[in-house]
Amino acid sequence: MWQDQPLRIAGRPVANWLNSVAADLTARVLAGLVDELPIYRALPREEVNGEIAAIIQYNMELFATLVRERRDAFDSELVEQRNSAARRAEEGVPLDAILHAYHAGIGAASKELFEGAGPEDMDDVQVVMGMVLDYLRRLTIAVSAAYLEERQIMDSQENSGRRSLMSALVSGEPVDAVVRRTGLRVAPHYLALSLAIDETSDERGYGVSGTVAGRRKLRRLQAELDRITGEPALTVVDSSGGTALIPCPSSPPDWEELRQMIDQARVVVGADLRVAGAVATPDNVPAAVHETSEIIALVARSGRGPGLYRLADVLLEYQLSRPSPAHVELARLLEPLAAKPELMQTLEAYVASGLNRRATAATLHVHANTVDYRMRRVFELTGLNPSDPADLPQVGAALVAKRALGRPARA
């Protein structure tokens, strides 16, 4: 019967032709989107060339299947498009820009497909045109519904309740009213995390929207935090850092395993993370958050690398950074270096490297002999020799005190 014959236009079986040119058409559609709509120019390259390209090509190949089988799309075949729309909603991409991409893809394919049609093709052209319009109708409905649903979820009572619970826990206010209103439960313990987050390459990229790239980063981070105990993390985090409370069992976490999970999160997020952690009961959350925020500030001042830190990892520096009359006197030991920043920089790098002159030289991009010369000058000016075990504790304490004060002490 004629229905069993493949639809053909300009001598080409429509379904086979669509499959053969899907990749090429996808590249051209993407180029057009980037050229026509600023939002696509601002998106990270990895997103445009990855997920968005994949969904455009998937649409063309799906439509080829529908033409071959002469049927409408099943709801299950539009799941990828709905999921993609939900992710764009999270990132703040406008709905009209999303729909434009889908229409541009089908439109580009249709234009080329119908261009060579002759009078003998009119029956098949009418069938394919009807399928195009029906597919775009179904696609527009599915994508719009998923997008709007995600936006509603983002502002839902559950999210509002989590924010309220987070606020109550961190401020030390009673949580009973929040629990009654939202139905959320309070965990027996929370892993309190303070985070400092570096920029991703996308956020630094020329012409890339930092807002969209930052949202993508935070979405990946949220997923990794949720994985730590399998419970949704309560977070107040922006693209540079913030605070997270992760429900955890009564026993303390395996800190080595947690360290590995933070390292894995760095890879997934695509940015360096410095994280300070402590476990607390709900009543002690405010103290834990205060402690971890001080630890993360200390880690930042001391120039430590990315990773997970606990109080046990910075005990001496933490104690030395507490307000004390000795701070000024300790910092004053390094006062002779105030006008010589290259000496101070070298001293800090030398101590941080474990007194390794070659590692210090590599860090500062100078010759090892330059490090030796500068350390001699430090000794001459301050009377402290960092290489001498008797002087090293005072040098370390003076550096911590100087960082705590934020500036060289003056008489």
Image: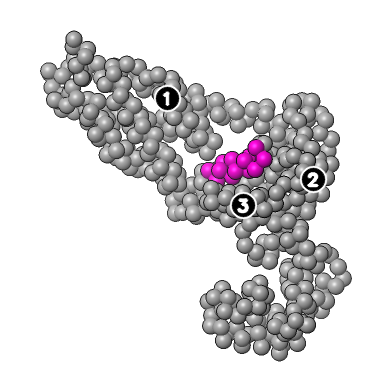
For badge 2, the amino acid type reads Ala
> Residue 328: horizontal and vertical position, in percent?
82, 73
Dividing the picture into quadrants, the one containing residue 409 is bottom right
* Mark whose residue sits in front, 2 or 3: 3
In whole angstroms, how far apart are the C-alphas of marks 2 and 3?
21 Å
The C terminus - image quarter: bottom right
Against 232, residue 394 (above or below) is: below
For badge 3, the amino acid type reads Gln
In whole angstroms, how far apart are the C-alphas of marks 1 and 3?
37 Å
One can see residue 202 in this view: yes
Work out whether mark 2 precedes mark 1 in sequence or the reverse, and give the earlier one. 1
Label 1 element class: helix
Residues in magenta, as a range: 216-230
In depth, the one of 258 and 68 nearer the eye is 258
Q: Residue at x 84, y 41 (%)?
A: 283
Q: Is residue 385 left or right of residue 58?
A: right
**Badge 3 density bin: few <14, some 14–19, many ≥20, Cα 10 Å:** few
> Residue 227: horizontal and vertical position, in percent?
62, 41
Work out whether mark 2 precedes mark 3 in sequence or the reverse, and give the earlier one. 3
- The question of residue 401 being in magenta is answered with no
- The question of residue 229 being in magenta is answered with yes
The residue identified by callout 2 is 280
Q: Residue at x 35, y 29 (%)?
A: 59
Dividing the picture into quadrants, the one containing residue 339 is bottom right
- Badge 2 vs badge 1, beta-carbon distance below 8 Å: no
The N terminus - image quarter: top left
Against 41, residue 153 (above or below) is: above
The residue identified by callout 1 is 78
**Badge 2 density bin: few <14, some 14–19, many ≥20, Cα 10 Å:** many
The residue identified by callout 3 is 260
Dividing the picture into quadrants, the one containing residue 235 is top right
